[in-house]
Image (cartoon, rainbow, N blue to C red):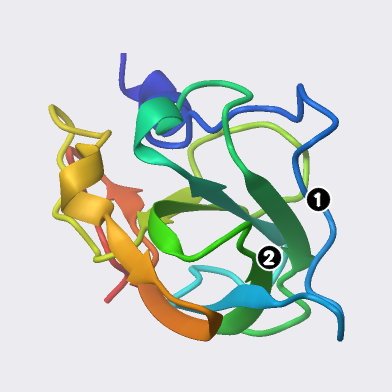
Amino acid sequence: MLRFVPLLLLAFGSPAFAQHSTAGCTAGTPHRVLVSIRGLRASSGGVRVQLYEESGFLDKGRWLARVEAPAAGKRNVEVCVPVPRPGTYGIAVRHDANANGKSDGGDGGAFSRDPKLSILRLKPAFAQVAVPLGAGTSRVSVTMNYRHGLSIGPEG
């Protein structure tokens, strides 16, 4: 059972619809969020940041924007994600520590507003992660969580 915890924690959708943004920000991106990701367990692999509205929060393929970036030898990274319009959104982050494209025991996850997670409660409610993102550039910080035996939490 515990082998599958990362699968539940990191159950983020795949790109199913062409209208979703998978590119990072460009000079022409009018609204964006800079996501500061703290506490990567390993400086290897990559991170995936996904932006959701309440109606599709954590549903497969329902993200509005998804940006992937290498950890590039760092324990903290910043990723720029385009935002379609000012509003309230949830942000989900996955760290694929070994870059195998699969969710496994060494991978981690995080959400905007850093809700407390547990083995029994791996997916927070949208209200726990909702952040207002305004016009122009917004900033959000998240702290990565990893499995530690029977608990879920930051490295440390």
The quadrant in which the N terminus is found is top left
Nearest the viewer among 137 and 122 is: 137
- 110 vs 50, left or right, is left
Say if 72 sits above or below 59 in the image. below
| Residue at point 44%, 76% (across, down) | 134
Viewed as shown, does residue 66 lie left or right of 135? Answer: right
Percent position of residue 106, x then y: 51, 47
Q: Does any portion of residue 107 appear in the rendered image?
A: no
Q: Tell me which amino acid carries mark 1.
A: Thr
Instruction: Look at the numbered disc 1 and give the secondary structure of its residue.
Output: loop
Residue that carries the numbered disc 2 in the rendered image: 82
Identified by mark 2, the residue type is Pro
Characterize the local packing of mark 2: few (<14), some (14-19) or many (20 or more) Cα atoms within 10 angstroms.
many
Task: Give x and y (percent) for residue 38.
Answer: 44, 79
Query: Measured from the top left, where is residue 129 in percent x and y?
Result: 26, 54
Q: In this view, does 95 lie above or below 33?
A: above
SS label for mark 2: strand
Label 1, label 2: how far apart the Cα atoms are:
9 Å
Q: Is residue 55 visible?
A: yes
Residue at position x 62%, y 43% from top?
64
The one of 58 and 55 positioned closer to us in this rendering: 55
Residue positioned 25% across, 34% down in the render: 122
Can you say which quadrant of the picture contains the C terminus? bottom left
Per the image, the residue denoted by label 1 is 22
Q: In this view, does 73 lie above or below 113?
A: below
**Image position of 88 (left or right of 139):** left
- Using the image as rendered, state which of residue 154 and residue 57 is in the foreground: 57
**Looking at the image, is mark 1 or mark 2 earlier in the sequence?**
1
